[in-house]
Amino acid sequence: MHIPETALQDLHERLARTRWPDEVPNTGWEYGTNLAYLKELVHYWQTQFDWRAQEEMMNQFAHFRADFDGFGIHFIHEKGKGPDPLPIIITHGWPSSFLEMLKIIPLLTDPENHGGKAEDSFDVIVPSLPGYGFSDRPTKCGMTISRIANIWARLMTEALGYDRFAAQGGDHGASVTEQLAASHSDSLVGIHLDMVPVHHVFERPPIEELSQSEKEYLQQLELWLQEEGGYAMIQGTKPQTLAYALNDSPTGLAAWIVEKFRSWSDCNGSVEKRFTKDELITNITLYWVTETVNAASRLYYEAAHDHNYIHPKHQRRRRSDVKTAFAIFPKDILTAPRQWAERWFNVMRWTEMPRGGHFAAMEEPKLLANDIITFFRPLRSPKR
């Protein structure tokens, strides 16, 4: 992967011309991204951040592209180093990217070199969602969660030749992985999720059927939507309006994204307790240089308007029979109880982690990788 130098020069010129807004003094992050911190981050972006070094890091992995009916998908495909690796496709969410998964790839492909066993190795496939990173940007309506799941199935079976495989994801990735299980169960040995997809709230049963923990979860959801869910409403209804600002101002883009990394991670209000400046800025720069913030945001719109995916209350989704594991990280945006998950999933493993948040693969790669390895160990078969 190589970004033209002209794009990087343009980025630095725009950063230098940032017109900073005012801020109510002593409000911290209460109104949104803190001015002092963003100035610090942008100054580092201008003066110390080295995109070429990050490109070199990315290019240590094996990158590929595949075409599906004229639409190009970027993906990493790293082969396992054990005797019979299990293929697994891992899907990121927003405002993340394939970069989130780079820490767990070696833990899964080469567990023996990280204190584990060679027979637990995986062939790891990490695609960029359509409209994200180095995948193509959709030019037509209808790039829904359901359609992405179908593309992933073709990627694994047609392009890569795997008969059966595992799947993992969080955020949008959890929804895509769930849809894979719903539409392509014969190809899956099991799925592993690090959050319960939020869209199931549209299928909630009558309140008298809910447990106390489920009622508390739905109350937390309502509060979260009021205090934190504005981004999803904007991106799910009018993403194009937002895109003019975010695609024109790298500082604005940084403000939009870094606030989520702070709010949704297990950082106790200090984002750099969990992510380095280089990690934050590399992800932001990927959105900037590929001009994908609009296409990425549109996935919220597509999901919200996909009536085959978002079921009204009177159309209850059938419970999946695919074996499923959940790794629940305490500082994720929402932590559903097991009873809620069991309404839609065949839950075989439920792990409540001691720490970590929404960006589990970046925050706690060892915890996540070990849970994936443990869940899939008995599901492996020499005949795949």
Image (tube, rainbow, N blue to C red):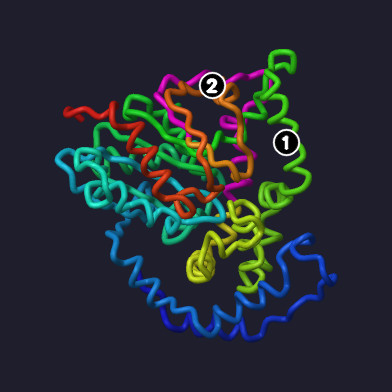
Q: CA distance from mark 2 to mark 1?
A: 19 Å
Residue 151 badge: none
Label 1 environment density (alpha carbons within 10 Å; few <14, some 14–19, many ≥20): some
| Marker disc for residue 342 | 2
Local crowd at mark 2 within 10 Å, few (<14), some, or many (≥20)? some
Nearer to the camera, 257 or 108? 108
In this view, 325 is above or below 28: above
Q: Secondary structure at mark 1?
A: helix
Magenta span includes 352 = no
- Does the CB distance between marks 2 and 1 fall below 8 Å? no
Q: Name the residue rendered at 41%, 39% in the picture.
A: 168
Locate the N terminus and report the quarter of the image it occupies: bottom left
Whether residue 62 is visible to the viewer of this picture, yes or no, is yes
Q: How many marks?
A: 2
Residue 142 vs residue 294, the one in the foreground = 294
Q: Quadrant of residue 349?
A: top left
Q: Point out the residue furthest to the right here.
A: 24
Residue 170 % position (x, y): 50, 42
Residue 303 colored magenta?
yes
**Residue 201 horizontal side relative to residue 50, left or right:** right
Q: Is residue 72 visible?
A: no
Q: Position of residue 224 (x, y in %)?
A: 73, 42
The residue segment tinted magenta is 298-326
Earlier residue among tags 2 and 1: 1
Residue type, numbered disc 2? Glu
Residue 40 percent coordinates (x, y): 63, 77
Q: Residue at x 29, y 61 (%)?
A: 61
**Above/below status of 281 relative to 361:** below
Residue on which the image places disc 1:
220
